[in-house]
Every structure is written in structure tokens, then in C-alpha cells.
Amino acid sequence: MDVWKIGASLCALTSCIALIAQAQLNSANPVASPWEHDKWSYEYFNAWWYEPSPDCSIYESCVFLVIEERVACSADVLVSFTVSDDKDLFLDSQTHVITASTFRSGEVVEVGTDSADVAYFAIDDIACSTGGDTTERSV
């Protein structure tokens, strides 16, 4: 007659293990899922903001993106962006180049500038091409 108690205990134990496993899997994957945030689509790539954004390590002002390859790209990845000040007035348009040899689909990328007074970034395009990097690096 105590069989139902054993069954209920096993069911509760299985549920607890499943919840713990789900929490560990979610914490092991630091890249935000694209369906949790706004995702932008370009010809070759999807991209979204990486949140929470860490401190800049390469540039004075930066944002962090996750760039996911949709179509195979054998050239460099060019991230074109516009920066503006705290009043949202245009400061500059720049291009960040990720070389083909260093680009890894789905990884977090620091995109930034050493331009002064930057408050906002707008990602204009992410393309598979060649071009010059117009950002300055403080490191």
C-alpha cells in the first residue's frame, strides 16, 4: 500500500533533478539566445546585443554583439555603425573589421571606437566583404 508514496517520491526527485539540470545548462551558456532579444538579419548574418554588456577591453566606448553566420562567408566581416552623443546627435560612421581567420559564428564581439563623447551606437550593416577598419584601438 506504500507503493504510491515511492512513486510520488520518485516523481518529485525526477522533477528536482530536471530543474537543477536546466539551471546549470542555462548558466553554462553565457551568450544570450536570439529569441530572448531583438535580432537583426542581414544578407549573411544575424546579430543581437549581448546582455549584460561587460566593460570595454579594446575601445574607449563599445557595445557587444553576437554575430551568427546565416550564409557561409569566406571574406572578412564588416560591421558598419554610427555613433552619436548623449543628445543623439551624429558624431561619426565607422567600420569595424573582423578578419575571416578570427571570426567565429555565435561568439561575442566587442565593437567600438575611441571617438570622444560617444553615448549611442547604431549598427547599420554587417556584411561579408573586404575593407578597412576605421576605428582606433586603445589597447
Image (cartoon, rainbow, N blue to C red):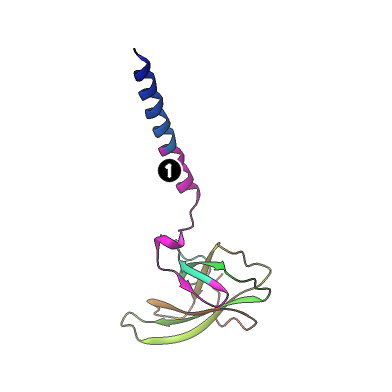
**Pointer 1 residue:** 23
In this rendered view, identify the residue nearer to me: 2 or 68: 2
Image quadrant occupied by the C terminus: bottom right
Q: Is residue 61 visible?
A: no
| The quarter of the displayed image where residue 100 is located | bottom right
Task: Give x and y (percent) for residue 63.
Answer: 45, 70
On the rendered structure, is 19 left or right of 28? Answer: left
Q: Callout 1, which amino acid?
A: Ala
Q: Is residue 97 left or right of residue 4?
A: right
Question: Is 54 contained in the magenta span?
Answer: no
The quarter of the picture where residue 86 lies is bottom left
* Left or right of 137 in this view: 55: left
Q: Is residue 128 above or below residue 13?
A: below
Magenta residue span: 19-45
- Residue depicted at x 45% and y 86%: 92
Closer-to-camera residue (70/52)? 70
Give the percent coordinates (x, y) of residue 13: 40, 28
Where is 25 relative to 37, above or below?
above
Q: Nearer the viewer, residue 5 or 114?
A: 5
Q: Secondary structure at mark 1?
A: helix
At label 1, counting other C-alpha atoms closer than 10 Å, the crowd grade (few under 14, some 14-19, many 20 or more) is: few
Quarter of the image for the N terminus: give it.
Answer: top left
Q: Position of residue 52 (x, y in %)?
A: 41, 60
Residue 102 placement (x, y as % from top left) = 65, 67
Residue 48 visible in the displayed image:
yes
* Front position in the image: 96 or 59: 96
Outermost residue, front side: 1
Q: What residue do we see at 38% from left, 77% from top?
A: 120
